[in-house]
Amino acid sequence: MKGNNSAINGKKAGKDIIQGRFFSLDFFKRNAVYIIALVVMTLAYIANKFVCQSSMQEVLNLKVELANAQTDLVNASADYNSMILESEMTKLMREKHLGLTAPDDPPYELKSK
């Protein structure tokens, strides 16, 4: 008789869905815990997706900022390297009137015996 009873319940459920009585107040009272859990999980999913998208955007912005900083580093390094050339040092000594002169002879190493 169980098989016959489930068939009747299945027909009744189908009839209730068609007539719009499946989602009655009684349904919501019986399944309130499940409905609330489903709503909370859905909201948590949406919030998690928003946080992930925000984090990904921040990572992309930081990558752009890093690329700009690396470019600035290369430019600063090139400027520094051009400033330490002997010709640039000589030019700066003349412009600043420091009273210094660049040696004409190349540096040499002293060897002890």
Image (spheres, grey):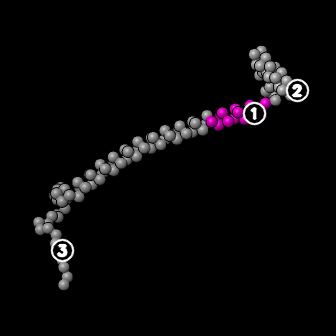
Q: Earlier in the sequence, mark 1 or mark 3?
A: 1
Distance between mark 1 and mark 3 Cα atoms: 87 Å
Task: Name the outermost residue toward the left.
Answer: 104
Residue 39 is one of the magenta-drawn residues: yes
Earlier-in-chain disc, 1 versus 2 = 2
CA–CA distance between discs 1 and 2? 31 Å
How many residues crowd mark 3 within 10 Å: few (<14), some (14–19), many (20+)?
Answer: few
Tell us which disc is closer to us: 1 or 2: 2
Mark 3 lies on a secondary structure that is loop
Q: Which element type, helix, strand or loop, lies under badge 2?
A: loop
Give the residue type that dot 2 points to.
Met
Is residue 29 found inside the magenta-colored segment of the image? no
Q: Amino acid at mark 3?
A: Glu
In the drawing, does residue 18 fall left or right of residue 107?
Answer: right
Label at residue 34:
1
* Range shown magenta: 31-45
**Amino acid beneath label 1:** Tyr
Looking at the image, which is closer to me, 11 or 19?
Answer: 11
Closer to the eye: label 1 or 3: 1
Residue where numbered disc 3 is placed: 109
Q: Residue at x 14, y 67 (%)?
A: 106
- Residue at point 63%, 36% (across, down): 45
Question: Residue 73, image x and y in percent?
Answer: 33, 50
Rendered residue at 57%/39% (across/down): 51
- Quadrant where the N terminus is found in the figure: top right
Q: Can you identify the residue that label 2 sits on?
A: 1
Q: Is residue 26 above or below residue 34?
A: above
How dense is the environment of label 1, judged by Cα within 10 Å: few (below 14), some, or many (20 and up)?
Answer: few
